[in-house]
Image: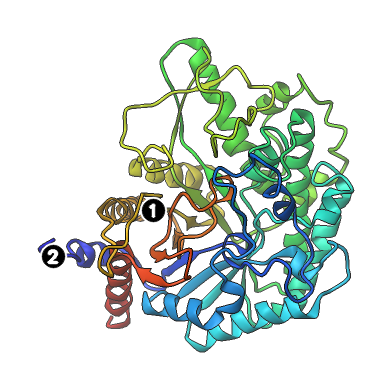
Amino acid sequence: MTNEFEGAAALAARFPTGFTWGAATSSYQVEGATDADGRGRSIWDSFVNEPGRVVDGSNGDTAIDSYRNIAGDVATVKSLGLNSYRFSLSWPRICPDGDGRINPAGLRYYSDLVDALLAEGITPWVTLYHWDLPQALEDKGGWPVRDTALRFGDFALIAHTALGDRVKHWITVNEPWCAAFLGYASGEHAPGRREPAESIAAAHHLMLGHGLAARAIKSADPEATVSIGINFYPVHAASDAPGDVDAARRVDGVQNRWFTDAALRGTYPEDVVEDFKAITDFDFNRDGDLETINAPIDVLSVNYYSRFTVTGNGGSASASAAPTGAGSAWPANEHIGFVPAGLPVTDMGWEIEPAGLTEMLTRLHAAYPEVALAVTENGAAFPDKLDEGRVRDPERLDYVQQHLSACADALDAGVPLVGYFAWSLADNFEWAWGYTKRFGLVYVDFETGERTVKDSGRWYGDLVRRARSNREAE
């Protein structure tokens, strides 16, 4: 390309002073060392060992070995010029059985990572739960059981007690939709159960866990920034037919409104409750639960990848996370189909729609004006190749550029957007897709662990440095 950083300067100028620029990872996807230093077993350790669960038969035992590479990971973040890094804590690494028994080595790893980031001027954003539930708690029923939420509240306090003197940004639960409905309805993710009614109970208890964790952190440190991470999708009807319009309402309700209304309004959407009554009596929702879930938060974390177009006339049963023969992820809505809108797609088959991010951000601000927003995941998988020491990934570069433009459009519209985190910092274990899909700004040789910054990472780093230097010069 004649100017590999074309467009970065003008785009950088559209972002405000103090904007958070980062990249994100999650513990099971990057750490490896699954049997090191007293770490307990997680539901993903069990899930990946069941034949057919992961498309390439791989696991996260090694991942990209971040557990033994703090210096390298921090150096990578610094090399991109980022001022923040979002990572998650492995619950079983800190509390092997999910209870109050603490593994000091696990806490030491995260403490060392936080110190290394801060030494380089990089602000840690810590996610408490990114899907690696201790297997010991799953053996007792997992997220469909109320006690799991209570234990998560305890875990949040343990983590904050150890790290809260240095960590000021906390995300409680990442993508509760995935944890509940891919884990307990479709079986596409760990623990691989196909129990639609139980998945709704799991969704409730994940939100209850969020509320307990948020309240524990705010009680310990009122100045902490607390958030919840939700994967949002604009949902459009395939036509004006009543069945398609109703399908869009239903999917939007389960994917988006169920979680935001609970967290920010202390109520579940009445229409979604009515839909779910076909398979559950809501006996898991006890008096006071929604008040607990409606804990004060400072930021709503927005994970955005794509959009949905739906029909009430059947079709693809789900927007599948992996072609592993799983069931529907839409309890009480199994009749709904997902149809393509004719847009370009990523290597995951996800449609690329940057305008959908602006749509989602402006909609969320209009509905919940009291809370700031941050894009905490946004990225795309493409079939990257290392060629003579370089990874040319123009599709991802365009994707990042277009979605950052969408963020700038939202800022122009008055949305209080405070940060952007690319997904992901580096190629890693992509859940049920194993190592077959690459989302990273950094290419990883999965045999040697060697890292190479892709063209998209170089472009993003250049934009970040321009944005930061522009504001520092003001």
Q: Which residue is drawn at 46% across and 65% down?
A: 23
457 sits to left or right of 330: left
Quadrant housing the N terminus = bottom left
Residue 182 against residue 462 in the figure, above or below: above
**Nearer the N terminus, badge 2 or badge 1?**
2
Counting labels gives: 2
Quick one: 44 or 423, which is closer to the camera? 44
What kind of residue is marked 2? Answer: Asn
Q: Distance of mark 2 from mark 1, alpha carbons?
A: 32 Å
Could you say whether the residue bearing mark 2 is in a helix, strand or loop?
loop
The label shown at residue 414 is 1
Residue 450 against residue 322 in the figure, above or below: below
Residue 211 % position (x, y): 75, 54
Report crowding for label 2: few under 14, some 14 to 19, many 20 or more residues within 10 A (C-alpha): few
Q: Mark 2 points at which residue?
A: 3
456 sits to left or right of 294: left
Q: Residue at x 26, y 59 (%)?
A: 392
Residue 181 % position (x, y): 67, 37
Quadrant housing the C terminus = bottom left
Quick one: 393 or 401, which is closer to the camera? 393
**Which mark's residue is nearer the viewer, 2 or 1?**
2
What kind of residue is marked 1? Answer: Gly
Q: Which residue is drawn at 77% across and 53% down?
A: 209
Q: Which residue is drawn at 78% across and 29% down?
A: 197
Residue 164 % position (x, y): 69, 78
Could you say whether the residue bearing mark 1 is in a helix, strand or loop?
loop
Residue 402 against residue 35 in the figure, above or below: above
Q: Which picture quadrant has residue 327?
A: top right
Q: Which picture quadrant has residue 300?
A: bottom right
Report crowding for label 1: few under 14, some 14 to 19, many 20 or more residues within 10 A (C-alpha): few
Residue 273 % position (x, y): 72, 27
Quick one: 175 or 414, which is closer to the camera? 175
